Amino acid sequence: MDALHWLRQGDFVTQGTAALLLLMSVASWVVIVWKSWLMHRARTDVARGVAAFWLAPTWPVARQQIATLDREGLVLPLVEAADALAQPPDGSITLAQAGSASQQLTRVLRNALHLVLGKLQWGQVLLATIGSTAPFVGLLGTVWGIYHALTAIASAGQISIDKVAGPVGEALVMTAAGLAVAIPAVLAYNIFGRLLGRIEADLEGFARDLRELVVDASPVIPAKPLAKPAWIPKSAPSPVPPPAPDSA
């Protein structure tokens, strides 16, 4: 009734299912341990980085302090994106520089925020996939194990409760193994999702404050109108109004 005896008696489908569940369990626990460490550092870095920015007297000092506190690089990309647009333009006109200061900052900060959140969300898809598929993988192993056991019993010609209980009970272990793999993954996915929501809200609020700081406090990014493309016809000149009749 031990696991090695059951694996040796099983065919390639049973052994492959057990190996797949083992691989899924190892992968989920690696992600769980790594993301637990990442989330702990991320919460600390965001809180320290935002506080250090607002306490700094100038942008260079703020960047230097955040670079030492932001170990995971979550707050510094937002500050660097806003600082780049806070510098006077060099005179070149592109589509990215054609909008107003508010539009440019919104676009740049949104891109930086997406990169940061993409780093924090790594592994969530794997946990969700393992949590949703592991029970069915275990159920597949159970069904196949029961079928294999009943076929062996029927071919032997001896059907009794002691002959059926052992092989069927061993096959049912696959269902328990699937649940043992899925439950930690689902719990970790829900916990990390809640922590991600809090960190995302803090970063979005900080990005909004950066936008208002650069646009309202020091609006140094003037909007640059684009030159009219050659394929757009020029507007017809306005007709000259006729002279007013002499009042005699």
Image (cartoon, rainbow, N blue to C red):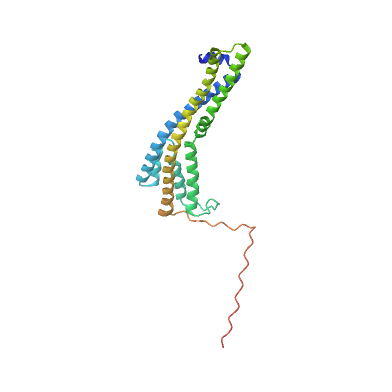
The quadrant in which the C terminus is found is bottom right
Does residue 73 appear in this view? no
State the image coordinates of residue 140 (x, y, percent, origin top left).
57, 24
Q: Which residue is at a point 49% across and 40% down the rendered structure image?
A: 115
Question: Farthest bottom residue?
Answer: 248
**Front-most of 225 and 163?**
163
**Front-most of 4 and 56?**
4
Label tally: 0
* Above or below 134: residue 222: below
* Above or below 226: residue 2: above
242 relative to 3 in the view: left or right: right
**Front-most of 101 and 169?**
169
Q: Which residue is at a point 40% across and 33% down the rendered structure image?
A: 40
State the image coordinates of residue 112 (x, y, percent, origin top left).
48, 43
State the image coordinates of residue 223 (x, y, percent, origin top left).
50, 56
Does residue 107 appear in this view? yes
